[in-house]
Amino acid sequence: MGVKRPNRRDFLKRGAALAGGVTLGAAEPVIRKATASAQSIEEQSQEVPSQEVQDWSSDELVAYGERSQHVTSVREPVNGRPSPDDFDLVFHIGTPLEEQVGAITPSSLFYFGTTRGSIVPTIDPAKHRLMIHGLVDRELIFTMDELKRFPSVTRLHFIECAGNGSSPRRGRLIESHGMTSCAEWTGVLLSTLLEEAGVQADGTWIVAEGVENVRGASSLPMAKAMDDIIVAYAMNGEPLRPQQGFPLRIVVPGFEGILHVKWLSRIKVVDRFYMTYNDYGHLRQDPDQAALSYQVGPKSVITWPSGGLDLPGAGFYEVRGLAWSGGGVVSRVEVSTDGGENWMDADFRGTPQRMAHTAFSFNWTWDGSEAMLMSRCTDELGQVQPTRAQRKGGLDNSIQPWRVQSNGSVTNGLA
């Protein structure tokens, strides 16, 4: 039996009348007015300007897809160095956080940092191997298929470059904070592989090494290796992208980005801290302070509005931002609109995760006068994000102020 399809114009008539809080039988003048309005809307909806129609049925778009041509957010070179340079090397490329929605960074917009301008290797996963050796009972070599047979974990974690930080010379958000991103990582816990190899009693550190042309490597304490380091082969639900270490990398939750070795090929268990190529200039030589003293955060930044943007006029705005900490879960974010004189609690947009970006928002009615927007983060350890004056070294996690001018333009409050 056929189904009678509702008449769209009749539906619009009834909807307009009911929206006015009247019955169909008692409001002829209202219905007549609403009908005219509905007809006008319908006519306007049919007046679509001529435009080029994209063929979304192509083999390429059916196979993988792409974003709308009207979505234009892109990464940009940061830290004042062109990418690619005269030698076709790509260095640091920042994420446009001011355009990000939510806590997860799309894989295509995830920031990219290299080890002194290394070349992204092209690796056949069928031929790739991971070796675990050194102070272990059994030296092991894994294929990718063998790694994927181990129990896996999927966790949300941020990665941040040590070069991120507030500065009077960095006017836009991508310049000051673009070298941090957050993704969902899937892989095997490093502790699972180390237990399989059998770590010897004097194995107190590991050295992780990748296969890129400069042989990037990092030293990490065994306590961290046995805690939460992930040997990751997937990101945001699909295999790692080449710039993010395909087919294998480590994710070191809460620690600075250069320690998250990409294109991972071997892990050596050792009895001391080694100053590797990656570690030089980043970690202290004192083994008790190395790596652990460079834990990130707590940190937060207002992403909208931020430097280089404009507010169209006085009125209501939702101030948005991100908070994160290498010390664990973000427990509180506060926002100030008067340069730190008064602080008010922001709302979390989602449930905060351990060592991951946490999206927050704050409802603000701007009166049109000059304002100074700031945010500060507190983590589960009770650590509070400092101002630049309060900061005592280490990675820069100081508060970033944004100045809102009376004309609506937003600039770096440190400038």
Image (cartoon, rainbow, N blue to C red):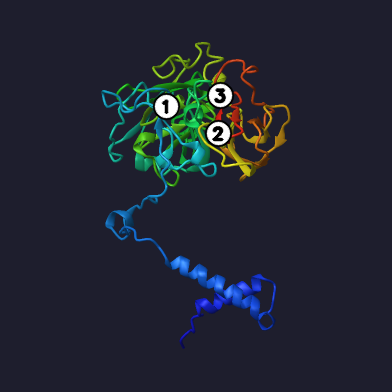
User: Is disc 1 in contact with disc 2, using a CB cutoff of under 8 Å?
Assistant: no
Q: Horizontal placement of 63 versus 27: left or right?
A: left
Residue type pointed to by label 1: Val
Q: Residue furthest bottom?
A: 1
Residue type pointed to by label 3: Gln
The residue at 73%/30% (across/down) is: 342
**Compared with residue 147, is residue 340 higher up or lower down, i.e. above or below?**
above
Towards the viewer: 134 or 401: 401
Q: Select label 2 or label 3 by which is in front.
A: 2
Q: Select label 1 or label 2 by which is in front.
A: 2
The residue at 35%/43% (across/down) is: 145
The residue at 52%/16% (across/down) is: 290
User: Is disc 2 in contact with disc 3, using a CB cutoff of under 8 Å?
Assistant: no
| Lower sequence index among marks 3 and 1 | 1
Image location (x, y in percent) of residue 120? 31, 31
Towards the viewer: 75 or 254: 75
| Lower sequence index among marks 1 and 2 | 1
- Residue under pointer 1: 78
Image location (x, y in percent) of residue 8? 50, 76
Image location (x, y in percent) of residue 402? 59, 29
Towards the viewer: 180 or 266: 180
Q: Quadrant of residue 245?
A: top left
- Residue under pointer 2: 409
Secondary structure beneath dot 3 equals loop
Secondary structure beneath dot 2 equals loop
Res 352 seen here = no
- Residue under pointer 3: 295
